[in-house]
Image (cartoon, rainbow, N blue to C red):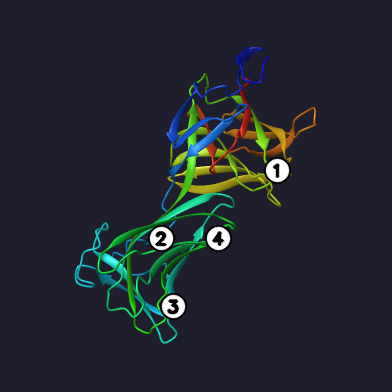
Amino acid sequence: MSRLSRAREGGGYVDYFANLGMWTPVLGTADVATGGGFKALTAANQGNNLVSNGEFTTDTTGWTLLRSAISQVNSAAEPGTASGGADNGAIKVVTNASGNGAATQSLTTIIGSSVKANALCYVPDANATVNAGKIALVSEGAQIASENSWLAMTVTGVMIATSSLMILRNFSGAENDIAYFDSVTAYRQNTLYLHTGPTTPDMTYIWALNMPALGVVPRGLVVRYTDPLNYWEVRIKPGTAGDDTDIVEVVAGVETVRATADIDWSTSAIDRIKITLRGAAITVEAMKSGASAFTAASSYATMATGLTQSRIGYMAYGLPSTGETYSFEVVG
């Protein structure tokens, strides 16, 4: 059987990703990579806003000042133009004698994932420094392009830690310069496709994944999917030190790692992951490249959500991806 075929073998369904005919897009777009395999092309917002209190409706709770003064304002009164956000609330960042102030917030993130941050910003032309408003995430930043109007800024960064700093920066070197911000969001970027083949809530699946030579971009094997905010995920984290195989429960967009294991996945090779669902139990086994049998990885015996859901899927975490999958099999 050729690498690019799709067939039934021994009563089980095997997909070798010659095309994506058995997969339905939910987030982003994908295609078949050269030589076969799932390749993410575009991504979309996944889950909840990672930013707490990004509208500043009543206060600046959740934000920490850095070498500056911060306060909540009604944008219709100050700076005098409504921001266009969900309400008129905004945050005002004023530089002190040292200049270069900011409001910061620590976001919970996944190593290797991409996050897109957005904000509205207004800086007055009375500032000593021109266009002194900026948003930053990890090492990436975006600067406002002009003054005296609310403008949107967007930046996307790849996360290098489980805690990442979001910065609303007033980078003026002069004292008492002002920058206003509103509608601050940060969303993880994913590509998600659901399988349309024969499945039931209790099934066994085998994924063969092309593990990368370098990098720590996760692969998400989604099971018992209800909607983008409610599902279970076996999160494979190649190239990651320590635990790298998580069973994650997602309820209303909130993630809880229910079990984890340290497998030390291969590099530049095909590793296999078997997922077995039986009632409230999920079991994950691994067969690394060169091995002849599956061995225990992680398991969780008291699943309490999505027990009647049968949809499964693949979630890509990075762009561009290149043939992340080798095959997908429904065993029974």
Residue in the image at 37% along x and 85% along y: 175
- For the residues labelled 1 and 2, the Cα–Cα distance comes to 36 Å
- Could you say whether the residue bearing mark 4 is in a helix, strand or loop? strand
Residue 163 numbered tag: 4
The answer to which of 36 and 59 lies nearer the viewer is 36
Q: Residues within 10 Å of mark 3 (few under 14, many from 20)?
A: many
Foreground mark, 2 or 3, reads: 3
- For the residues labelled 4 and 1, the Cα–Cα distance comes to 25 Å
The numbered mark, 4 or 2, whose residue comes first in the sequence reads: 2
- For the residues labelled 2 and 3, the Cα–Cα distance comes to 23 Å
Across and down, in percent, residue 90 comes to 30, 67
What amino acid does circle 1 point to? Answer: Ala
Q: Residues within 10 Å of mark 1 (few under 14, many from 20)?
A: few
The numbered mark, 1 or 3, whose residue comes first in the sequence reads: 3
Residue in the image at 51% along x and 48% along y: 255
- For the residues labelled 4 and 3, the Cα–Cα distance comes to 23 Å
Foreground mark, 4 or 1, reads: 1
Circle 3 residue: 100
Quarter containing the C terminus: top right
Up-down relation of residue 239 to residue 184 (above or below): above
Q: How crowded is mark 2: few (under 14 residues within 10 Å), some or many (20 or more)?
A: some
The answer to which of 244 and 38 lies nearer the viewer is 38
Specify the quadrant of the image occupied by residue 126: bottom left
The numbered mark, 2 or 3, whose residue comes first in the sequence reads: 2
Residue in the image at 62% along x and 20% along y: 4
Circle 2 residue: 52
Residue 187 visible (yes or no)? yes
Residue 213 numbered tag: 1
Q: In this view, does 215 lie to the left or right of 173?
A: right
What amino acid does circle 3 point to? Answer: Asn
Q: Is residue 177 left or right of residue 226?
A: left
